[in-house]
Image (cartoon, rainbow, N blue to C red):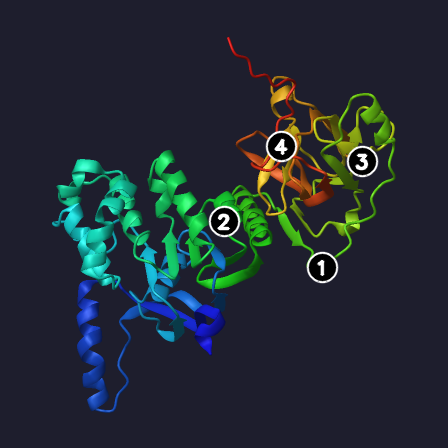
Amino acid sequence: MFCDETAIGVKGISKCYEMYGKPSDRLKQMLLPELFGAIGRKGKQYYKEFWALRDISFSVKKGETVGIIGRNGSGKSTLLQMICGTLQPTSGDVMVCGRVAALLELGAGFNPEFTGKENIYLSGLLYGVDESLLKERFDSIVEFSGIGEFIDQPVKTYSSGMYVRLAFAVIAHVDADILVIDEALSVGDVRFGQKCMRFLREFQKRGTLFFVSHDAAAVVNLCSRAVWLEAGEMRMDGDASDVVEAYLAEQHAADREELGVDVGVNFRRKDFNEKGKAGSMNRDFRQDILNGRDPRNVFEVFEFHEDRVRREFGSGAGRIFDVKLYDIAVGSDRKGMIFNGGEEVELRIEADVLGEMKNPIMGFYVKDRLGQRLFGDNTYIPYIDDPVSVSLGDKLCSKFRFVMPVLPNGDYSIDVAFASGTQEDHTQHHWMHDAIIFRATESTMRTGLVGVPMTAIKLEVS
């Protein structure tokens, strides 16, 4: 049955709005078609159709976290309203299994004339929570919201942040099976945002989360899957990291197009299981142990090969042809394919200049398996006062030397990019996702995203 495994089922839904040029056209549309129909004539249509959504279909399994991304006006909020039942589709079906709690827009469900306390009971009862249970949880709701004495004031006097605090505090206490969040978390302050994220991560262990945000990092961080909407149509549905990367590449191409620069987007769809062959070990780590160095965070690096890069985009005025990660201890003339966290490494990116450009920039990001960007840098700042001049046919080689942090066990990748312009306004000529993949093993790190190698740890009593 539907509710055994599926929390949300969306089948072929579309939503059409009637757009009238002036108020009188609305009245004409109400009356004249029926009059013309009575005498056997076809009446004129006095409105234009605007399709907010067209033929959207997908399903969400119980316990799954799905992110929705897209530009303003792409239909994200319309979709969420139909899932929550506050808006009916023009065609298609929406099926939901379980209690849904939603934070769709500022103060949704609140009566502005009521106090915060009264709105807690109003919203809770609308969600189907018994009044006795709301009384038990009232103090906890107020504490979660952090609005203190303002709870007895009309919510029309609240700031936007206070609205969100109270609304989120309510949905956190109604025992929902499905949470629907629409971008509202960006209104709160940092401390409240962190509290909300902790709650959402805890909720993910027992419920289904449907999350809309313009924050690509938040989508990648929270969601295992993402749906990309564009102009009311589903553009892509898949792994959150893949969808977000494709979306950001498309947005960069659209921004450059407005300036008359053509940036092509090429995402190779072939799947691959092999990440390439690891390089041979360049030194014996047993000798390091004898020398007092403890290899507790070993990195195994897989060689760069252009054919294995699945996702890339750019204008084509430059092209990256080689990426290497060196172990400085071994020597820059040999690729150190196995090394340690806490050791100095050098990342080299080489590219051909295939078109005219000014102020070339090369850079990189290191990402974890979820696609979260851990750290990175580029060549812009060091050469901001004296930009490098290049001509057609030149070759560029950028070198980034840094201490590799200690990382938890798992797979990591490096994105590399070749652009030109400034930090704020630039054109990507060639961006490669996952140009190099490496694996961290034997790590003693247990918490956090990255670890900083300690030079000394002491505990003294005086």
Q: Marks 1 and 2, Cα distance to the nearest angstrom? A: 24 Å
- Where residue 212 appears, x then y in whole percent? 42, 53
What secondary structure is found at the residue carrying circle 2? helix
Dot 3 amino acid type: Ile
Disc nearer the start of the sequence (3/4): 3
- Where residue 56 appears, x then y in whole percent? 46, 68
Q: Residues within 10 Å of mark 3 (few under 14, many from 20)?
A: many
What secondary structure is found at the residue carrying circle 1? loop
Question: In the image shown, does 233 or 120 lie closer to the viewer?
Answer: 120
Disc nearer the start of the sequence (1/4): 1
What secondary structure is found at the residue carrying circle 3? strand
Residue receiving disc 1: 271
Question: In the image shown, does 300 or 312 lie closer to the viewer?
Answer: 300
Residue receiving disc 4: 376
Query: Residue shown at 35%/71% (left/top)?
Result: 89
Question: In the image shown, does 24 or 95 lie closer to the viewer?
Answer: 95
Check residue 222 in the rendering and tell me which mark sits there, or answer none.
2
Dot 1 amino acid type: Asp
Question: In the image shown, does 167 or 395 lie closer to the viewer?
Answer: 167
Q: Residue furthest front?
A: 461
Give left or right: position of 117 versus 243: left
Query: Mark 1 against mark 2, which lies toward the viewer?
Result: 2
Disc nearer the start of the sequence (3/2): 2
